[in-house]
Image: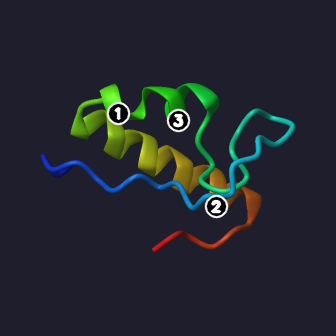
Amino acid sequence: MPSTAPNSPCINVCSLDERGYCRGCARSRDEIAGWIRMSPQQQWAVVHAAEERRRQRGERQIA
């Protein structure tokens, strides 16, 4: 993983689904709340986890 931090995946669609993930960025409430305190490696792990959640929901990836 890169050592530089990724941009926040937030797309300003802030609403949690029935499983507790944001409908916009696919992060959990804890992932959203802790984002600024995470290391770049932790942030990249969250980005990849959110991409997988979107893939499982059948949504396209955020560029």
Q: Amino acid at mark 3?
A: Ile
Answer with mark 1 or mark 2, whichever residue precedes in sequence: 1
Of circles 1 and 2, the one toward us is: 1
**Secondary structure found at label 3:** helix
Q: Amino acid at mark 2?
A: Arg
Query: Is disc 3 surrounded by few (<14), some (14 to 19) or many (20+) residues within 10 Å?
Result: some
Residue identified by numbered label 3: 32
Question: What residue lies at 58% left-to-right and 42% top-to-bottom?
Answer: 27
Q: Quadrant of residue 37?
A: top left
Locate residue 20 relative to residue 62 in the image: left or right.
right
Residue identified by numbered label 1: 36
Locate residue 30 relative to residue 40 in the image: left or right.
right
Query: Is disc 2 surrounded by few (<14), some (14 to 19) or many (20+) residues within 10 Å?
Result: few
Instruction: Name the image quarter holding the C terminus.
Output: bottom left
Q: Amino acid at mark 1?
A: Ile
Q: Quadrant of residue 56?
A: bottom right
x, y percentage for residue 11?
A: 57, 61
Residue identified by numbered label 2: 55
